[in-house]
Image (cartoon, rainbow, N blue to C red):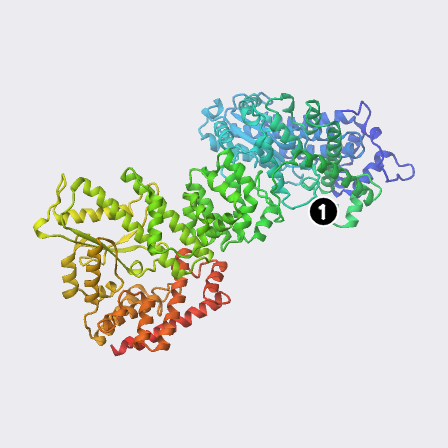
């Protein structure tokens, strides 16, 4: 200390611009000055006049040493049985009050400079923590959980390490600051090994006890607020972390901001020697052997996240944050710590803890100019002094200046300035100097700033400004969103644990969050991305693509918010995004031949069945994703998407059948003269497949009874041959591989349902449908078409099916039975779910059943009804006079609207989740049908379904009339 041996009362200087009363001693004037502007200091000075007199009469350095020693002795006295817990708590707090008063008077009276003030505060905090640790250890010893340590003894063997970080660790503590502590323990220590309690529970209890001893408020106040959040991944770990676990964390997923935090780490309690060894072991993590230029980008990205606002305008003094604001304390610390991280691996002189010392070392090592050293140091001293004044006012941890002019003017005088303009000029001048030097250091850094607002995801806790920014971006639960992104930075998702992934993530985060905020469901989109990161082995490729292409970033965000299935495809195979950049993305929907050609081109010539299965899945994923994305982007209509999805399925079935048949023939040969065809039914059959639809398939085969054995090295009977070949085909379509599966396949529409062979012999199939099939089976057959197989056989099968459908039938009988079937479905599956557009009354099933009834009753006279989907049947029925033109037009429009919405549902929110869909998604559905908003959409769908049900009953008859 610089005070010499004179008493404090003689050393203090009267405050500038605060005249003394007549005959008033400088010390008395200083106390009056402090009380005028600080309620906290007024209370400290007035509550114990004798204490104030003792401080005035004592030499400040000796008084500081005495108070620190008394604070340290509290723990020893408790361990020796001289004090109860309550008495120890009281002593700790009274010593805090005495020390706070001493420091404030030595600071305000210009007896100590800022370095001396911060060191005194840090020494006192060390003593407080050591006493609290000794008390907590003694209590555990009394409970039989730990061996007893002699009062004041070395705590070697305790297994406990308490590190001070931040300004406390550096010996630069604020007047009213939290103490940033990290508690580690050695689970194999002598103390832990001899305890009946598990180490994690034991040392967590100790850490919690230390925190209560220091921060619990009593009538005597508190000692220090304790912050344990700088420990490894604080959201997922207890307050005490094992040393091996901490080491693995730092070495595997430790972030650059944690390297910066560890620069200031200092063992202050517990087994100090063990703490020093831990920091020595951790040195390769903190201090890289090579010049770590990548750290500049990462640390600067953290700073730019803090100030995610463009430009460097004039500093508004009112409400300015002297720590986090422009030209503030944090900028000086970043200026120093970044260069320490980059160069400290090779320059041991740059490994110090104190900011001012390291400014000097950076100059001595040739990294900064003398001007930068001096101006940054002078600004640091000024800002730290202002920070102390702010915190002295009410003993609050604040760095924000008052917002009102009168309060600012009073605060300016508290800082020793004549008026507000003088203080504002002093602050602005220094902040601009800091900005200048900081800007020179990072002038080549990539630009990440935006007009979004604060976006801070590093550090120990969720930033309030970030929460507000996320709320403005559209996140309904911004706190959860912030914690999710923080989890990525803490390495909670394997996909983003690599250094490169986190580097790209840091740069991408603001733009990615802005894109997610613009999606239909920002919270759901972020949650889905988080789940994807949890499943993905690595995310570097995806993150790099999203960083490089705004168009892809926006689309991916849209997919996450609107189309989770497509988003999952991207997460598994980021390269599918290439399709969006292809010029053909904006081209019309591909026909069946083009879709098949594209799939074949992507599959190429695999060398094995395993390779084929992987390649065909990759190809399917790519073309399926492109189609869904084109629908989502409005490039194609839902009807065109239905045709495209069906064309993709047909191409995949053809390719899988060819591959299965070729591989099967290599082992079993072929059945001479045999023929095979695959029928598609349902939506696949009428070329209106939705995203995620199953495939309704029926496999037909025919052979010559005289040649029913295959000619391969392992011959099979024709029935067995085609059954097993069909099983191979189904396996190729449905088997899950490392690339996923292609489709779910439903073969229940074959004559035997689920009980018979998977393949149907052609002659038996036709005979069954001519003589035995139920009406519902003929209804299903109206949507059948041949997808793959022998061309001549396909034509023959199609002709036979059409002849079956064109058989004359009684309209009254068909209409009655179709109506009864619809009522049965309603009873068994319900029809009241408004958003189940298939099963709801007046929905798609009504339209399909009506169309199928018209085919079965009128195809004999109007063969143009055959081979059509529901829209085609309705149109033909209108032209043929089977339906009134007005009814046909209304049914056609109803089908268009319902089917369009159904396509979007399958792509986005699911079939029956309309009410749970985010409002933005409902607005998109509304726009799809030309409705102004969600309410109008609901009204429109209700009107349509009422109209459909009315026509349905008009044609088929009311239930009571059947």
For the C terminus, the image quarter is bottom left
Left or right: 571 in relation to 649: right
Q: Which residue is drawn at 61% across and 25% down?
A: 344
Quarter of the image holding residue 873? bottom left
Q: Residue at x 55, y 31 (%)?
A: 183
Residue furthest to the left? 706
Measuring from the top left, give residue 649's x and y in whole percent.
32, 53
Left or right: 376 in relation to 656: right
Q: In this view, does 246 lie above or below 799?
A: above
Give the labeled residue for mark 1. Answer: 319
Q: Local crowd at mark 1 within 10 Å, few (<14), some, or many (≥20)? A: some
Left or right: 520 in relation to 352: left
Measuring from the top left, give residue 418's x and y in whole percent.
85, 42
Q: Is residue 912 among the parts visible in the rendering? A: no
Measuring from the top left, give residue 81's x and y in whole percent.
59, 27
Q: Residue at x 73, y 27 (%)?
A: 369
Q: Is residue 826 above or below residue 559?
A: below
Residue furthest to the right? 22
Using the image as rendered, state which of residue 149 and residue 160 is in the foreground.
160
Could you tell me which secondary element the residue under label 1 belongs to? loop
């Amino acid at each position: 200390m610089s005070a010499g041996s004179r008493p404090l009362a003689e050393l203090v200087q009267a405050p500038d611009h605060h005249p003394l009363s007549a005959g008033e001693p400088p010390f008395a004037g200083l106390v009056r000055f402090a009380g005028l502007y600080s309620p906290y200091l007024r209370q400290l000075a007035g509550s114990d006049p004798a204490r104030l007199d003792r401080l005035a009469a004592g030499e400040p350095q000796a008084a500081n040493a005495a108070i620190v020693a008394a604070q340290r002795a509290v723990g020893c006295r408790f361990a020796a049985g001289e004090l109860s817990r309550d008495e120890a708590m009281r002593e700790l707090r009274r010593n805090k009050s005495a020390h706070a008063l001493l420091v404030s008077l030595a600071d305000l009276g210009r007896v100590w400079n800022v370095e001396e003030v911060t060191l005194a505060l840090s020494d006192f905090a060390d003593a407080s923590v050591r006493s609290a640790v000794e008390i907590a250890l003694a209590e555990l010893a009394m409970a039989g959980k730990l061996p007893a340590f002699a009062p004041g003894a070395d705590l070697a063997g305790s297994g406990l390490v308490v590190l001070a970080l931040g300004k406390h660790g550096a010996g630069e503590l604020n007047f009213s600051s939290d103490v940033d502590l990290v508690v580690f323990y050695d689970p194999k220590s002598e103390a832990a090994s001899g305890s009946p309690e598990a180490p994690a529970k034991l040392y967590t209890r100790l850490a919690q006890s230390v925190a209560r001893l220091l921060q619990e408020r009593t009538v005597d106040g508190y000692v220090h607020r304790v912050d344990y959040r700088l420990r490894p991944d604080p959201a997922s770990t207890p307050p005490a972390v094992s040393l091996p676990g901490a080491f693995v964390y730092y070495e595997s997923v430790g972030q650059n901001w944690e390297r910066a935090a560890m620069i200031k780490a200092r063992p202050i309690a517990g087994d100090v020697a063990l703490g020093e060894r831990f920091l020595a072991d951790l040195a390769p993590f903190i201090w890289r052997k090579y010049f770590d230029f990548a750290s500049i980008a990462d640390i600067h990205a953290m700073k730019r996240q803090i100030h995610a606002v463009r430009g460097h305008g004039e500093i508004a003094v009112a409400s300015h944050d002297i720590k986090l604001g422009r030209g503030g304390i944090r900028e000086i610390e970043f200026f120093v710590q970044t260069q320490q991280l980059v160069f400290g691996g090779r320059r041991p002189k740059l490994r110090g803890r104190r900011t001012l010392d390291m400014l000097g070392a950076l100059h001595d090592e040739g990294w900064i100019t003398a001007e930068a050293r001096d101006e940054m140091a002078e600004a640091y001293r000024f800002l730290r002094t202002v920070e102390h004044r702010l915190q002295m006012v009410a003993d609050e941890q604040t760095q924000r200046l008052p917002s009102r002019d009168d309060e600012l003017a009073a605060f300016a005088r508290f800082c020793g300035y004549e008026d507000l303009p003088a203080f504002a000029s002093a602050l602005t001048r220094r902040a601009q100097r800091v900005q200048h030097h900081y800007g020179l250091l990072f002038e080549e850094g990539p630009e990440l700033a935006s007009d979004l607002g604060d976006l801070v995801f590093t550090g120990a806790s969720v930033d309030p400004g970030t929460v507000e920014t996320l709320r403005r971006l559209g996140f309904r639960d911004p706190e959860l969103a912030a914690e999710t992104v923080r989890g990525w930075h803490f390495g909670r998702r394997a996909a983003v644990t690599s250094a490169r992934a986190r580097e790209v993530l840091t740069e991408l985060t603001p733009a990615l969050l802005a894109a997610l905020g613009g999606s239909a469901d920002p919270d759901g989109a972020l949650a889905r991305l988080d789940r994807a990161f949890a499943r993905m082995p690595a995310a570097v490729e995806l993150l790099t693509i999203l960083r490089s292409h705004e168009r892809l970033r926006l689309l991916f965000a849209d997919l996450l918010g609107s189309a989770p299935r497509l988003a999952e495809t991207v997460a598994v195979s980021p390269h599918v995004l290439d399709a969006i950049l292809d010029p053909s993305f904006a081209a019309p929907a591909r026909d069946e031949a083009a879709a098949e050609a594209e799939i074949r081109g992507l599959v190429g010539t695999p060398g094995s069945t395993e390779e084929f299965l992987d390649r065909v899945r990759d190809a399917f994923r790519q073309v399926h994703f492109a189609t869904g994305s084109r629908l989502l982007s409005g490039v194609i209509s839902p009807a065109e998407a239905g045709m495209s999805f069906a064309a993709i399925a047909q191409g995949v079935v053809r390719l899988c059948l060819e591959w299965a048949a070729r591989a099967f023939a290599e082992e079993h040969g072929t059945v001479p003269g045999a023929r095979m065809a695959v029928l598609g039914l349902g939506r696949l059959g009428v070329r209106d497949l939705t995203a995620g639809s199953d495939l309704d398939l029926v496999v037909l085969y025919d052979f010559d009874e005289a040649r029913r054995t295959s000619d391969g090295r392992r011959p099979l009977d024709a029935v067995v041959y085609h059954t097993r070949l069909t099983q191979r085909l189904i396996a190729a379509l449905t088997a899950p591989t490392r690339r996923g599966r292609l489709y779910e396949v439903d073969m229940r529409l074959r004559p035997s349902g689920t009980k018979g062979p998977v393949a149907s012999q052609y002659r038996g199939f036709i005979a069954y449908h001519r003589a035995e099939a139920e009406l519902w089976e003929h209804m299903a057959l109206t949507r059948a078409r041949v997808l793959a197989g022998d061309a001549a056989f396909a034509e023959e099968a199609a002709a036979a099916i059409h002849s079956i459908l064109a058989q004359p039938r009684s309209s009254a009988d068909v209409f009655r039975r179709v109506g009864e079937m619809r009522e049965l479905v309603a009873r068994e599956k319900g029809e009241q779910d408004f958003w189940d557009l298939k099963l709801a009354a007046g929905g798609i099933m009504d339209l399909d059943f009506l169309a199928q009834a018209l085919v079965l009753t009128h195809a004999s006279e109007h063969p143009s009804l055959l081979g059509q989907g529901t829209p085609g049947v309705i149109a033909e029925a209108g032209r043929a006079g089977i339906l009134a033109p007005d009814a046909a037009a209304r049914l056609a429009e109803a089908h268009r609207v319902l089917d369009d919405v159904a396509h979007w549902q399958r792509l986005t929110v699911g079939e029956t989740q309309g009410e749970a869909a985010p409002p933005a998604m409902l607005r998109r559905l509304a726009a799809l049908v030309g409705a102004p908003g969600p309410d109008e959409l609901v009204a429109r769908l209700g009107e349509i379904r009422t109209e459909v049900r009315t026509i349905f009953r008009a044609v088929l008859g009311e239930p009571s009339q059947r």
